[in-house]
């Protein structure tokens, strides 16, 4: 479970707040979609949750571990897929997966079975001995997802994870997210594709200008706007009012 | 015209391969003011240094010119200066032009726009202007001007000098551009073209360094005899066939001959026209072919039997460092091959400076037998060698920037920043010692075996040169952890924008101050050499340790708060 209390962050002193007094609980056993227009503060919030950025104010705990005061314990709890897959380009796929396994202390037996399983699911077995620099954008994205999931953590945090994936891989990832949440784990991902959020998410968080606009299930959201049935219209309405 | 200037800007940005520093947006107004002030001071100092260098060259030429005029070979001397300046331009612009014409990574940004091919080619030629005319401004022009004033030239000779300097960069630029286009045509299907660029740049740079060392360019003007001038000119005589206009310009500058001047101007003008004709027909075709050729996929390879072996986080991070450097020709050259040249160059310089004395071994023996403080002298070379090698080596000065966006990916993983920095430092120090210690110890051993220096000097050489390398590594690390550049397009930008070498070299020179103090202490205060060298070693070790922990602590704090 992720608990966010009074989280604020601005990128320049006295400037506009990218995240403004955010309070939200992301519960276990659910897939939570993080929705908002461009520049709403989704990526910043994810960076704050993962410890990539440091909050100006507020507190974030992941399964009870504070990301600022207990960073190592907190980081062991989650897998993070960032919005840029162009990392570790000089490593071969297998070297990258081994590197991540070493960082997370995954033993040889577990890593072997996990790498084989993930590579097979994402159809990357044939590309493991190739340098990541030679991969296509979609293959890089798959490799980053595989690296993030290799230590099988309870919390999954993903920033636009479906961008660049082919339909088959996108389907596999969505199925994996469902399986993971069904086991009582926590999945939080950001997306611009409202259809995906509508079909996949148990709850959604909508933010704009760093402020929380809505948190709850899709049914709760629809009940607030009785005249509107599509998520797209509700989203446009809610962000316009803001 | 505006279109052309915009195109030049885009080409310059694309071939530099860097974006704005990621930290800029987080800066307060005070920091921005400080940054602008620092840049203004930096550029002013650089400008003054350039001006100082130009004046020095001018005065040197002014002083030497009457000697050559008396001997009747002023034209040869000017021809030599022109060839040398064009050789310098050649080295300076190889990476730039190779990046623009051979790699052509910028083409993708504007090839779909309605721009004439001739504009593209012309913009690429003009993009090199700031680099080539810097050489002209600080070297070619002051040398020609000084020589002409010194020899009492007439106005037509000055006109020749001005036209010569204006046209001087044209032929080097065109020669490399033609080479790049031919290479591009030949290497259409080569995937990693950067390797070829890096190899060519390294080979040519190394060749020029060795040419410099063996041709006697470092001799003072009084020492240059006609025969030596002929030898020096001969060493780069191959260039006169590449830059034929120089002979006409130098003749015109010596005699004020207008026909020679006209031919001198017509040769680069004709070269430009021919190049434009060739480039418009072959360049874009080859470039587009190359872009398609680069999309080939590699064949699938089977995994090795040890593919899933585990390791500690520190070892894994170190392996990541090693792979990042060894799999990038740009990093490999700047982190290993250039530093490897440094001790060789220093030793050759040392030997060649002794070779001017009839018997170097005798000279060294007499120097040592005269002194009762040899123990203090002996590690001097080892320390300087280790410090300079560490300064040139870019493992430490680019260690965070090399990670690029991967820096943030790793930040989300459970590894402390201290551990990450420690691994990088340790890798950098090991590299420096691996390169410099064999040479440093070799120098010490030579003194022990050949000159009967106390064998304990070997121990001090190890301690002092290791400490010196550690101090320089930490100094460069400090610059890097203070403000890494994580947003870039090509690895070349990481290496080019690093100020570590300059600061490292300054640091290396400052490190020699305690050595000089130690010598003076022995000579003037009569302190025993063993005591003095012991104090020197303790100070170096203490500084190295304190600096390391300081940089580590500062780096961990600063990088934890460093944001995308």
Image: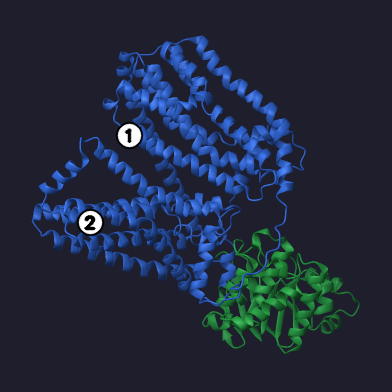
Say few, some or many: other residues with alpha carbon within 10 Å of mark 1 (under 14 / 14 to 19 / 20 or more).
few
Quarter of image, res B367: top left
Q: Name the disc covering residue B218, or none.
A: 1
* Chain B drawing hue: blue
Residue B422 vs residue B151: left or right? right
The x, y position of residue B263, in whole percent, is 55, 14
Element under label 1?
loop
Residue B101 vs residue B346: left or right? right
Element under label 2?
helix
The label nearer to you, 1 versus 2, is: 1
The x, y position of residue A198, in whole percent, is 83, 77
Q: Residue at x 58, y 57 (%)?
A: B487
Q: Residue at x 67, y 81 (%)?
A: A113
Circle 2 chain? B
CB atoms of marks 1 and 2 within 8 Å:
no
The x, y position of residue B541, in whole percent, is 28, 66
Task: Give the camera-side residue of B518 and B506.
Answer: B518
Circle 1 chain? B
Chain letter, green in picture = A
Residue A80 vs residue B130: left or right? right
Pointer 1 and pointer 2 on the same chain: yes
Q: Name the disc covering residue B514, or none.
A: 2
Task: Give the camera-side residue of B235 and A66.
Answer: B235
Residue B412 in view in this figure: no
Task: Give the camera-side residue of B343 and A176.
Answer: B343
On the rendered image, what quadrant is the N terminus of chain B found in? Answer: top right
From this view, report whether residue B365 is shown above or below residue B139: below
Residue B471 in view in this figure: yes
């Amino acid at each position: 479970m992720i608990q966010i209390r009074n989280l604020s962050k601005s990128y320049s002193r006295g400037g506009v707040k990218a995240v403004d007094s955010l309070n939200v609980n992301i519960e276990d056993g659910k897939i939570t979609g993080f929705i908002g227009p461009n520049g709403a503060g989704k990526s910043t919030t994810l960076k704050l949750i993962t410890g990539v950025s440091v909050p100006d104010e507020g507190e974030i705990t992941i399964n009870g571990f504070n990301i600022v005061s207990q960073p190592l314990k907190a980081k062991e709890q989650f897998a993070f897929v960032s919005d840029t897959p162009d990392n570790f380009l000089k490593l071969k796929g297998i070297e990258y997966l081994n590197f991540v396994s070493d960082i997370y202390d995954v033993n040889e037996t577990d890593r072997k079975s996990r790498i084989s399983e993930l590579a097979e699911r994402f159809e990357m077995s044939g590309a493991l001995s190739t340098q990541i620099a030679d991969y296509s954008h979609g293959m890089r994205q798959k490799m980053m997802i595989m690296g993030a999931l290799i230590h099988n953590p309870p919390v999954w945090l993903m920033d636009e994870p479906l961008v660049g994936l082919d339909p088959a891989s996108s389907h596999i990832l969505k199925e994996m997210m469902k399986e993971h949440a069904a086991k009582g784990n926590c999945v939080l991902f950001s997306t611009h594709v409202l259809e995906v959020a509508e079909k996949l998410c148990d709850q959604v968080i909508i933010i704009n200008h760093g402020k929380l606009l809505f948190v709850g299930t899709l049914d709760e959201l629809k009940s607030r706007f009785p005249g509107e049935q599509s998520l797209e219209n509700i989203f446009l309405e809610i962000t316009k009012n803001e | 015209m505006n279109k052309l200037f915009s195109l030049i800007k885009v080409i310059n940005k694309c071939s530099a391969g860097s974006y704005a520093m990621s930290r800029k947006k987080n800066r307060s107004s005070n920091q921005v003011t400080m940054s602008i002030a620092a840049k203004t001071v930096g550029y002013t100092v650089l400008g003054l240094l350039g001006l100082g260098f130009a004046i020095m060259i001018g005065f040197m030429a002014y002083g030497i010119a009457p000697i050559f005029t008396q001997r009747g070979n002023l034209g040869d001397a000017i021809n030599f200066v022109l060839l040398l300046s064009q050789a310098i331009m050649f080295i300076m612009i190889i990476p730039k032009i190779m990046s623009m014409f051979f790699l052509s990574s910028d083409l993708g940004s504007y090839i779909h726009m309605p721009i004439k091919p001739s504009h593209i080619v012309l913009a690429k030629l003009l993009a090199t202007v700031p680099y080539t005319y810097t050489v002209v401004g600080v070297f070619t022009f002051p040398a020609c001007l000084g020589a002409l004033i010194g020899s009492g030239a007439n106005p037509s000779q000055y006109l020749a000098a001005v036209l010569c300097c204006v046209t001087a960069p044209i032929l080097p630029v065109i020669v490399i551009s033609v080479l790049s286009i031919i290479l591009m045509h030949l290497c259409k299907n080569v995937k990693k073209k950067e390797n070829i660029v890096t190899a060519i740049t390294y080979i040519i740079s190394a060749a020029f360094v060795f040419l410099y060392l063996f041709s006697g360019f470092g001799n003072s003007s009084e020492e240059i005899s006609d025969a030596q001038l002929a030898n020096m000119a001969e060493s780069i005589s191959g260039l006169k066939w590449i830059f034929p206009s120089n002979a006409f310009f130098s003749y015109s500058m010596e005699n004020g001959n207008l026909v020679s001047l006209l031919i001198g101007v017509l040769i680069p003008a004709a070269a430009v026209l021919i190049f434009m004709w060739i480039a418009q027909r072959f360049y874009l075709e080859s470039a587009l072919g190359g872009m398609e050729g680069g999309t080939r996929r590699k064949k699938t390879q089977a995994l090795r039997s040890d593919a899933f072996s585990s390791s500690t986080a520190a070892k894994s991070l170190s392996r990541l460092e090693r792979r990042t450097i060894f799999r990038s020709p740009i990093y490999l050259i700047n982190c290993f091959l250039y530093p490897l040249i440094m001790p060789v160059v220093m030793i050759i310089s040392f030997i060649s400076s002794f070779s001017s004395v009839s018997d170097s071994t005798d000279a060294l023996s007499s120097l040592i037998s005269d002194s009762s403080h040899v123990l203090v002298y002996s590690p001097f070379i080892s320390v300087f060698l280790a410090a300079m090698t560490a300064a040139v080596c870019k493992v430490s000065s680019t260690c965070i920037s090399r990670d690029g966006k991967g820096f943030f990916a790793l930040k989300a993983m459970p590894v402390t920043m201290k551990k990450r920095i420690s691994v990088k430092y340790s890798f950098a120090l090991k590299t420096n010692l691996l390169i410099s210690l064999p040479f440093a110890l070799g120098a010490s051993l030579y003194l022990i075996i050949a000159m009967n220096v106390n064998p304990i000097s070997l121990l001090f050489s190890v301690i002092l040169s290791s400490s010196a390398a550690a101090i320089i590594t930490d100094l460069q690390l400090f610059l890097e952890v203070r403000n890494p550049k994580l947003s870039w397009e090509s690895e070349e930008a990481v290496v080019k924008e690093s100020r570590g070498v300059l600061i490292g070299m300054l640091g290396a020179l400052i490190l020699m101050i305690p050595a000089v103090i130690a010598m003076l202490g022995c000579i003037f205060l009569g302190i025993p050499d063993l005591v003095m060298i012991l104090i020197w070693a303790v100070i170096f070790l203490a500084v190295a340790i304190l600096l390391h922990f300081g940089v580590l602590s500062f780096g961990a704090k600063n990088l934890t708060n460093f944001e995308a």
